[in-house]
Amino acid sequence: MSEMERTVLSEAPTTGKLFDCRDAYSSALEAMAEQDKRVCAVINDSLSSAKLKGFKTRFPDRFINVGIAEQNLVGVGCGLANSGMIPYLCGASCFLTARALEQIKVDLAYSRTNVRICGMSSGMAYGQLGPTHHSIEDVAWTRVIPNMAVVVPADHIETAAAMRYSLHHEGPMFLRISRIPVPQVHAEDYTFRLGKAVKLRDGNDVTIVTNGVLVCRALDAAQTLEERGISARVLNMSTVKPLDREAILDATRSTKGLVTAEEGLAAGGLGGAIAELLAVEHPTRMRILGVPDVFAPTGSAEYLLEHFGLTAAGMVQAAIDLMKVER
Amino acid sequence: MAETAHDPADSAEQVQWLRRKANWIRLSAMTMTHHAHLGHTGGDLSSADILSVLFFGGILRIDPAQPRWPQRDRFILSKGHCSGAFYSTLAARGFFPVEQLKTFMDPLSMLNGHPDRNKVPGVEANTGPLGHGLPIGVGAALGARMQQEAWRVFVLTGDGELQEGSNWEAAMTAQHYGLDNLTIIVDRNRLQQGDFTEKTLRMEPLADRWRSFGFAVREVDGHDHAALLDRFGSLPFEPGKPSCLIAHTTKGKGVSFAENQPAWHHGVPTREQLAVAASELDAEVNW
């Protein structure tokens, strides 16, 4: 583990310096556009929330606004890729994935086009706006479609690294870009590898597998568990698809159970993907933390994470419960 | 069988040749449907003349030897269910051997019921669900402009297909960006799967609708090869505007028992009906 990661471990997410991953994504996109003339951005009206004012100013000829029209947004992206461009489609994840799901399936995944979907303000970031604006289904929807790569970065460092990776990825990719501020968990020189989990902390009692804004909370949970005599491994499974089977199977052999945690529905997402693997390959006790089969109430993102136990305390409790069952 | 665009001695000869080519496409598509026991005969027959003129009339700048030639014109079949006519056209134009048409919808055939760009040379977009082609065409036209390339984009849609709202989202983008390198051709055969379009969900005034969305609109008899050549030869219809060509067609065109019959949307011809069609079309398919 690097010095950087050790430093962060001792900090609570709410006390360390916090970053908006959207800033890292938009800076990375501008740098990639500078480097490669094929890079272009397409939005559905949301210039500010997609943080692309800088891109539009610097690369006006490679910036397209299709207006409030998500089906068209994805179709246009497919056509741009056909023409030889590398389009980044940027819009609120709740609308982009839901409204254009058939276009994502057919125009991008089935067609294997080099289009990147940047689902902004995903999960429960728009907590107060209500369930219409919560994007808690996006990982489940995208990860079951063949050919899709699905990535949920944990911090601004990983967001930028995943963006840089995406430039050379063959096929479509969904990047889930949160607006919930998070502390840095990866070292500055971190290299993103698609389909590879990052072991942020080793442990031999229990493994916490998570991604996105919950990774920093999992590190806090591991710290608390250690104080209670439970050794927790923490895997940042930022790539939901393709799933890092080896990292999961290794965790089941090395620890006594898995707690998964995700900022989205407990059904069909990261926990579901892991459960599908383990049910066949290595049945293992699990706790799947996420939003249960309900539409979330209104409330800030922090409030909703607390409400559904998607916190360090929630992960600690799940790990303790799991260990009790094991004993 | 593979042929290049026809270089006519005179226009009358070219029109005659394009008609023969279209009728071959018709009979080939019906033969494929007969063998597969599945297909979309009505739309195959209504679009055959448009396909013939685009692919054999020297309109599309394409090279079957280099299906992904970057400077090619893009032709997108938005009405992907008319794959019988489209595959027949591509094969006749030399994108793949005509013998492969025998495998239409067979297990593991590259000739799926709806076209797959990763399997079939000459296919630009995976279509089937309706309302996908125009947004993709708009994106390709935007891409040509970004790269300052002169190639053009043609999208062939059905008419019932225009009930999908995604078309109108794309139309607004085409207007906003003034995409005069984009042409939509509407196969206006007035029938959709269940009934006549005007009984199902009124399309008229269709030309006015496209005009109001900022397109330069022309109408044409979609079975008149000379008129189609003339219209395609005058693109863009107006500089700075996307073009819309409403091609008035007859569903099931050229085969008496199928013409204008809703049931022939996906009717499957018997051996006897195939023989009647061959006679009426004065065509022969021996792949």
Image: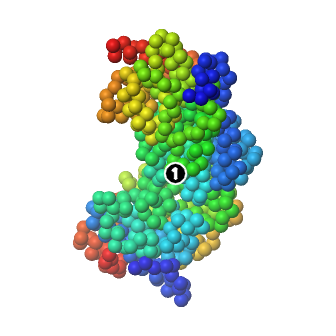
Q: Secondary structure at mark 1?
A: loop
Q: How is the image coloured?
A: rainbow
The residue at 35%/79% (across/down) is: B283
Q: Nearer the viewer, residue B10 or A326?
A: A326
Residue B219 is at least partly visible in this image: no
Residue at 49%, 58% (x, y): give it.
Answer: B125
On the image, the x and y values in percent for residue B11 come to: 54, 84
The total number of labels drawn is: 1
Q: Quadrant of residue B271?
A: bottom left
Q: Amino acid at mark 1?
A: Glu
Mark 1, other Cα within 10 Å: few <14 / some 14–19 / many ≥20: few
Q: Viewer-proximal residue, A173 or B38?
A: A173
Q: Residue at image x 40%, y 31%?
A: A250
Q: Quadrant of residue A120?
A: top right
Q: Quadrant of the N terminus of chain A?
A: top right
**Circle 1 residue:** A170
Evaluate whether residue B239 shows in this view.
yes
Q: Quadrant of the C terminus of chain A?
A: top left
| Outermost residue toward the top in this view | A228
> Residue A229 vs residue B287: left or right?
right
On screen, residue A258 versus residue A312, left or right, reads: left
Name the spot of residue B74 as percent of width and height, x first.
Answer: 55, 64
Q: Work out which residue is located at the far bottom of the displayed protein and give it.
A: B9
Asked if residue A20 is positioned above or below residue B141 in the image, the reply reads above
B228 left or right, relative to B97 = right
Q: Position of residue B228 (x, y in %)?
A: 54, 73
Tell me the residue at 46%/82% (across/down).
B17
B111 vs B248, left or right, is left
Where is residue B277 drawn, in percent x and y? Answer: 31, 74
Q: Chain of mark 1?
A: A
